[in-house]
Amino acid sequence: MTMNESHAEKGAHNQALIREVNERIVKLADEAAHPGFLCECADTNCVETIELSIAEYESIRSSPVRFPVKPGHDYPEFERVVEENEHYIVVEKFGAAAEIVKTLDQRSRTTT
């Protein structure tokens, strides 16, 4: 395993974990217009938040390989930026990292 593969795997696992926390935020923040979501970046030490609506989160979340992150929190070696705005960017995993997050995606597991 190369250094990039190891980082991609750790990052994918971290993103899946943070996604689970954000899923709970969605359930609890039913009425909030723009609840604070945790940045779903691959940095295992990141504790930053991003502001987006539940509708925006759900739109991103409709794909198991897309994640909302703070600008500059992307890792081009295993993800590409597919959307940008002033509050956050959306990254899309590819390669081994994409396979990991697909496997760990709770919504995919409950619908199949």
Image: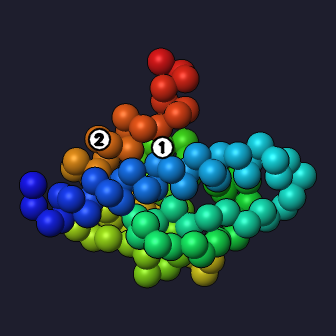
Q: Is residue 60 left or right of residue 105?
A: right
Q: Quadrant of the N terminus?
A: bottom left
Residue that numbered label 2 is attached to: 99
Q: Amino acid at mark 2?
A: Glu
Q: Are discs 2 and 1 less than 8 Å apart at CB?
A: no
Residue that numbered label 1 is attached to: 63
Mark toward the start of the polypeptide (2 vs 1): 1
Q: Is residue 112 left or right of residue 2?
A: right
Asked whether 59 or 31 is in front, the reply is 31
Q: For numbered disc 2, what is the local secondary structure?
A: helix
Asked whether 86 or 93 is in front, the reply is 93
Q: Amino acid at mark 1?
A: Ser
Which residue is rendered at x = 27% and y = 70% of the image? 76
- Evaluate whether residue 82 shows in this view: no
Q: Residues within 10 Å of mark 2 (few under 14, many from 20)?
A: some
User: In the figure, residue 91 lies in which quadrant?
Assistant: bottom left
Q: Nearer the viewer, mark 2 or mark 1?
A: 2
Q: Is residue 52 left or right of residue 17?
A: right
Q: Residues within 10 Å of mark 1 (few under 14, many from 20)?
A: some
Q: Is residue 13 above or below residue 84?
A: above
Q: Is residue 68 above or below residue 108?
A: below
The spot of residue 48 in percent (x, y) is 59, 75
The spot of residue 13 in percent (x, y) is 39, 51
Asked whether 107 or 84 is in front, the reply is 107
Which residue is rendered at x = 41% and y = 70% of the image? 43
Q: Is residue 16 left or right of residue 1?
A: right
The spot of residue 47 in percent (x, y) is 57, 72
How did the renderer colour the structure? Answer: rainbow
Which residue is rendered at x = 79% and y = 64% of the image? 34
Q: Is residue 13 above or below residue 8?
A: above
- Evaluate whether residue 47 shows in this view: yes
Q: For numbered disc 1, what is the local secondary structure?
A: loop
